[in-house]
Amino acid sequence: MSIIQVILLAIVQGLAELLPVSSSAHVVVAEKLMGLDPTTPQMTLLLVMLHTGTMFSVIVYFWRDWKETYFASSEAFNRFAARLLWATLLTGLLGEALRKFLERSLLRNSASTDIEQLFGRLDLIAPALAAAGVLILVSGLIERRRRNELPLTVSSNTFTESVRQTSGTVSFAQATWMGLLQGLALPFRGFSRSGSTISAGMLSGAPRQRAERFSFALAIVLTPIVIALEGLRLEKASRAAVSAGTYVSMRSSLGLNLLGLVCAFIAGLIGLKWLSSWLEQGRWHLFGIYCLLASIVVWCLHLRGL
């Protein structure tokens, strides 16, 4: 990999990871267009570093908001923590069940049954993008209709109630739907994690600010787990390469990976600012339209043999 390739992939990952357009789909397509193999240990290591960069950008961007909302009191924290752990548990259960199902069905006759072998398949990414696009589009249009139905002037009591409802955490029912949709996003590249969870929260009645805030809190819990799993996969691949006599040390690429982390961090902050701005302006549905168009492009690339 060259420095330019790493920077471009970091920008793609940093922006797309925090926008509801599926970073994994965009990174896979970008890697293929650059002639890189998304399933190699080298690309796995880079992806781990890029995910780490975007995780730090989420912490920096949301920390003040989380502190004022989730850490305002022990009661607020306990309420938030219970919903966060419940949603994460549902994510893990559904994600693991889907992983086993896919490995025993789509990969049953493959040389390798690792779920990662599916991550580079554009014929699976395209419909996943389309599904995410429909979900985002529907939730965005419903939310936009609700905004338009609000009276132009509101009383101080109504304003206070609005602030109260958007400043807390999601309900258990909303956390349930968000956790399940996040689990569905794990094995399917193209089914945006942030897009699906925020949409699930909005469709189940959560104000968009509350759904966004909780969605990225979920990401902070999930990302270290994903990084650890990718690290184990990298270690497994390295041991296999040593046994086969094809091991190539990746220490020389440490500088490139660190560069990718920093670039992904900066791009992540920009992506979060963009996302929050569009949510405030009622433009959430436009991300759904983008995902639908992107699914068409990805499918065309698949038909061309990419």
Image: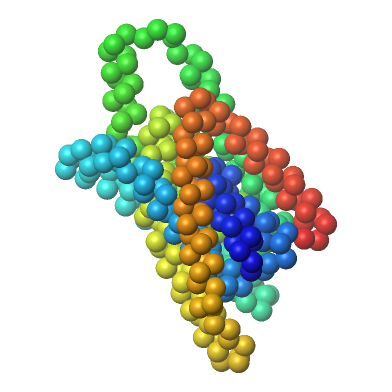
Q: Quadrant of the C terminus?
A: bottom right
Name the one closer to the observer, 67 or 90: 67
Residue 224 spot, x, y in % from top left: 39, 61
Q: Is residue 27 left or right of residue 161?
A: right
Residue 217 spot, x, y in % from top left: 37, 47
Does residue 248 sit above or below 163 in this rendering? below
Whether residue 109 is visible here, answered yes or no, is yes
Whether residue 117 is visible here, answered yes or no, is no
Residue drawn where x is 21% and y is 45% of the image: 78
- Looking at the picture, the colour scheme in use is rainbow
Residue drawn where x is 42% and y is 44% of the image: 215
Q: Is residue 18 left or right of residue 30?
A: left
Q: Quadrant of residue 32?
A: bottom right
Residue drawn where x is 40% and y is 7% of the image: 153
Farthest-out residue, left? 74
Name the one closer to the observer, 158 or 102: 158
Q: Is residue 57 left or right of residue 112?
A: left
Q: Quadrant of the N terminus?
A: bottom right
Residue 187 spot, x, y in % from top left: 55, 59
Farthest-out residue, right? 304
Q: Is residue 59 left or right of residue 1?
A: left
Residue drawn where x is 75% and y is 47% of the image: 297
Q: Quadrant of residue 256?
A: bottom right
Residue 20 spot, x, y in % from top left: 54, 42
Query: In the rendered picture of this protein, how many numbered marks are placed on residues?
Result: 0
